[in-house]
């Protein structure tokens, strides 16, 4: 287990359950929120990575991502990896909004594993990855 916390932003209860289960299988703890608004509010806490749905009621995942990136800039915070997890083939839109990577639903356990391996900071310092 790890103290790194993943936030899952997903409005569909079935996908919430599946993703929570997949992360548990990988030994990764998570919190689940079901709206873009909650994601923006909650990310100020200690979140190491976000799995972001795009189709959400109210604020969608692209807008939530843009808001999170804007906050990080304004508050001079390190940017949290945001990975799209969506049923839509809109990879370019996701990357343009400021996401780091893209998974299409339904994501396999191996997909989630790859994303965690690639994007989760190994020592609590995400900038280590880029050096
Ligand atoms: Mg959705």
Image: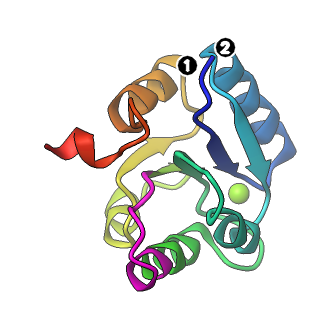
Sequence-first disc among 1 and 2: 2
Asked whether residue 86 is in view, the answer is no
Which element is circle 1 on?
A: helix
Do the CB atoms of the residues marked 1 and 2 lie less than 8 Å apart? yes
Q: Colour scheme used in the picture? A: rainbow
Q: Residue at x 62, y 66 (%)?
A: 44
Q: Position of residue 8 (x, y in %)?
A: 67, 47
Q: Residue furthest right?
A: 13
- Whether label 2 lies within 8 Å of ligand 1 gets the answer no
Quadrant housing residue 52: bottom right
The CA span between labels 1 and 2 is: 8 Å
Neighbourhood count class around disc 2 (C-alpha, 10 Å): few under 14, some 14–19, many 20 upward: few
Q: Which mark is residue 25?
A: 2
Q: Which residues are magenta?
A: 71-81
Magenta-colored segment: predominant secondary structure: loop
> What is the x, y in percent for residue 62?
51, 71
Kindly identify the residue that appears in the image at 75 percent across and 79 percent down: 58
For image coordinates 52% across by 46% down, the residue present is 49
Whether residue 51 is visible: yes
Q: Quick check: 82 above or below 119?
A: below
**Could you tell me residue 130's position as x and y percent?**
18, 45
Packing grade of label 1 (10 A; few <14, some 14-19, many >=20) is some
Residue that sits furthest to the left in the current view: 131
| Location of residue 88 with respect to 118 vertically, above or below | below
């Amino acid at each position: 287990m790890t103290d790194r916390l993943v936030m899952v932003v997903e409005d569909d209860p079935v996908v919430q359950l599946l993703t929570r289960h997949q992360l548990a299988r990988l030994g990764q703890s998570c919190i689940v929120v079901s709206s873009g608004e909650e994601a923006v509010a909650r990310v100020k806490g200690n979140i190491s990575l976000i799995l972001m749905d795009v189709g959400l009621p109210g604020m969608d995942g692209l807008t939530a991502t843009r808001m999170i990136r804007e906050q990080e800039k304004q508050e001079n915070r390190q940017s949290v990896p945001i990975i799209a997890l969506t049923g839509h083939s809109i990879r370019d839109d996701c990357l343009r909004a400021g996401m780091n990577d893209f998974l299409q639903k339904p994501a396999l356990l191996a997909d989630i594993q790859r994303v965690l391996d690639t994007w989760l900071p190994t020592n609590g310092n995400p900038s280590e990855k880029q050096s």
